Amino acid sequence: MNNQEMQNKRIMLTGDRPTGRLHIGHYVGSLRRRVELQNAGGFDEMYIMIADTQALTDNFGVPQKVKDNIIEVALDYLSCGIDPSKVTIFIQSRVPELFELTSYYLDLVTLSRLERNPTVKNEIAQKQFGESIPAGFLCYPVSQAADITAFDATIVPVGEDQEPMIEQSNEIVHKFNSLYGDTLVPCKIMEPDNNACKRLPGTDGKAKMSKSIGNCIYLSDDSKTVTKKVMTMFTDPTHLKIEDPGHTENNPVFIYLDAFCKDCHFEKFLPEYANLDELKEHYRKGGLGDVIVKTFLAQVINDTLDPIRARRKEYEADIPGVYQILQEGSLKARAKAQETVSRVRRALGITYFEDRKFIEKQSKAFKKKLADEKAMEEYLAKQKKN
Ligand code: TRP
């Protein structure tokens, strides 16, 4: 298959770091889409990776945390409806070919380019590494390029914070191809289409759901916990009395509704309104209390999570079976990555043992050299005698 034909394939790859259970921000930002794409069936191959190696770049001091969360992330995938017969779910570190690709790619990237990656820059500031930035952390976008290219992925569904990674990955692809010939396949990012889904704020209204802030609703939270978290959510601070006109923009309660609510939820839980537009209009006009809106939101989220919770329980009853899925997926992923590594080694010309012609050529050249030396020695010896 030539490079153009590879570019025309539809291969999806995405992944998550196993540092905690997945939350509803992951769900609307990515997981829901993955399941839709899987069920639509338009892909030649689909891969989802549990990025343990990447998680270790800033959790190297707590490897147990990464280990513990592999199963949580796998359970979240499966319970959202990822079907392992359609999607290869695998663990990053179980595909050592990714390390090899990372090494070659590191030569094609400058330190200053790594330091310019805006997502990495933000993370470094947040994590307060100071002067002690782990080299592996700074380089994780390069290993992410290995993840993407190892599978010839053409489509990478991720959140907008991952844009710089995709850009850097494609830069590496182009640099590699221009130096060594068309070998790697560039990819396209696929972002959520609904703005609310791009970056779901935390329940405190802060920019992002984050485990460390404790403003997350987890996919595995039970319905009581979800209701409690929703009822205490940050909402419009200027909406003090029910009669006050309210703001729906930048109001996390309404952003969540934008992300989750369907017309059928009104029919089911709040038949006084036909759709979200009507509800928003009433809130903005005044006369609609936050308790009604939040109660509805809790119902909507719980209605969405109920089937996910039910499936989670089934998989939780067979944990060895889940590990089996990951092991089989990792073997399958490895076979694919091995093909890519062979291609990459060939492009670099470092296929030493397989390149019989090259060995033959060198062998001939050395034989000739030996013969020449011998002839010269004989000639000199003869001269001496005379
Ligand atoms: N960086 C991604 C995240 O933090 C996880 C990830 C690792 C990934 N490798 C990837 C995503 C390759 C897409 C493709 O969520």
Image: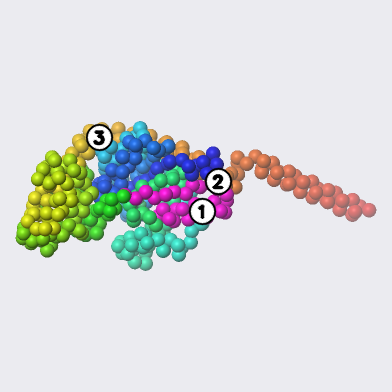
Q: Which residue corresponds to the image point at 43% horizontal and 61% vertical from the top-left?
A: 114
The circle drawn on residue 217 is: none
Query: Helix or strand or loop: what does disc 3 sit on?
Result: helix
Query: Helix or strand or loop: what does disc 1 sit on?
Result: helix
User: What whole-number distance in Å separates the C-alpha atoms at marks 1 and 2?
Assistant: 17 Å
Q: Which residue corresponds to the image point at 10% horizontal and 60% vertical from the top-left?
A: 245
The relative height of residue 33 versus residue 135 in the rendered view (above or below) is above
**Sequence-wise, which precedes: disc 1 or disc 2?**
1
Q: What type is the residue that disc 1 sits on?
A: His
Residue 225, percent from left and from top: 13, 47
Apparent side of residue 291 relative to residue 128 in the rendered image (left or right): left
Q: Which residue corresponds to the image point at 11% horizontal and 43% vertical from the top-left?
A: 271
Q: Which residue corresponds to the image point at 26% horizontal and 47% vertical from the top-left?
A: 28
The relative height of residue 270 versus residue 107 in the rendered view (above or below) is above
Apparent side of residue 65 relative to residue 277 in the rendered image (left or right): right
Q: Residue furthest right?
A: 386
The residue under label 2 is: 345
The relative height of residue 86 versus residue 290 in the rendered view (above or below) is above
Res 136 → quadrant: bottom left
The residue under label 3 is: 315
